Image: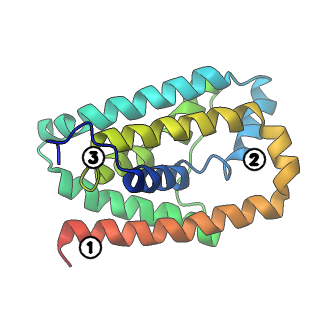
């Protein structure tokens, strides 16, 4: 897989972009972003997007080494990741709140860049994707998503008016179903079931 490093694959780029798009769920997070902006007065969209991209790229390259230090293999992490993705998908589809996070005062980095955009689910997904796809295709997926995240952060109020609460809810549920299928695929591929 790593021998043909510079071979870009459109199918893999689309897959990783869609998976990350569903996991990051920036459209579903618009109400949270609006609330954070209301509390803080201002969100630095550029800083939040760059920090999140940096964290994701760093984890893509160093995550496997970090796992080795604590004695885990990528397949085990991918299986654990499939469970995290499964529960995030269940939140999206059923409207549950399984993962609870508090919002401190400094919102552009914490909790916006981390953990809202580049959180545990995203990091787990990156390592899981690495077992399936070439690194350069995942990088393109990360960058495309961060461009979209930046666009959404810059235009949150307009997008909320455009989609409305019902439209955002439909998007969230649709991507939740996609995530459920991805979680099952990751689990099957890494367990051999």
Alpha carbons under labels 2 and 1: distance apart:
34 Å
Q: Is residue 164 visible?
A: yes
Compare marks 2 and 1 and give the one earlier in the sequence: 2
Q: Is residue 169 left or right of residue 184?
A: right
Q: Which mark is residue 188?
A: 1
Q: Secondary structure at mark 1?
A: helix
Instruction: Give residue 116's quadrant in the image.
Output: top right
Alpha carbons under labels 1 and 3: distance apart:
19 Å
Looking at the picture, how far across and down is residue 168, in whole percent? Answer: 75, 58
Q: Secondary structure at mark 3?
A: loop
In the orientation shown, which residue stands out farthest toward the bottom? Answer: 193
Q: Is residue 114 above or below residue 76?
A: above
Residue hosting label 3: 134
Residue depth check, mark 3 versus mark 2: number of the one nearer the observer: 3
Q: Secondary structure at mark 2?
A: helix
Q: Residues within 10 Å of mark 2 (few under 14, many from 20)?
A: some
Compare marks 3 and 2 and give the one earlier in the sequence: 2
Point 47% across, 30% down: residue: 53
Residue hosting label 2: 31
Q: Quadrant of the C terminus?
A: bottom left
Q: Residues within 10 Å of mark 1 (few under 14, many from 20)?
A: few
Q: Is residue 50 above or below residue 122?
A: above
Q: Is residue 103 left or right of residue 179?
A: right
Point 45% across, 43% down: residue: 141
Residue depth check, mark 1 versus mark 3: number of the one nearer the observer: 3
Q: Is residue 25 left or right of residue 152?
A: left
Viewer-side residue, 50 vs 99? 50
Looking at the picture, how far across and down is residue 91, in whole percent? Answer: 57, 64
Viewer-side residue, 152 vs 5? 5
Viewer-side residue, 103 vs 114? 114
């Amino acid at each position: 897989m790593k021998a043909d490093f510079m071979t870009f694959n459109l199918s893999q780029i689309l897959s990783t972009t869609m998976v990350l798009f569903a996991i990051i769920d920036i459209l579903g997070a618009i109400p949270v972003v609006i609330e954070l902006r209301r509390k803080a007065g201002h969100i630095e969209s550029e800083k939040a997007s760059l920090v999140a991209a940096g964290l994701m790229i760093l984890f893509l390259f160093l995550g496997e080494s970090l796992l080795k230090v604590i004695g885990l293999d990528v397949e085990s992490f991918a299986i654990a990741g499939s469970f995290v993705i499964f529960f995030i998908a269940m939140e999206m589809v059923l409207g549950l709140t399984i993962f609870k996070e508090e919002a401190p005062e400094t919102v552009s980095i914490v909790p916006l860049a981390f953990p809202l955009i580049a959180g545990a689910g995203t990091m787990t997904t990156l390592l899981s994707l690495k077992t399936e796809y070439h690194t350069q295709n995942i990088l393109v997926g990360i960058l495309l998503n961060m461009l979209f995240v930046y666009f959404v952060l810059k235009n949150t109020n307009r997008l909320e008016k455009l989609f409305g609460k019902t439209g955002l809810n439909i998007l969230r549920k649709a991507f939740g179903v996609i995530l459920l299928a991805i979680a099952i695929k990751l689990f099957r591929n890494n367990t051999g079931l």
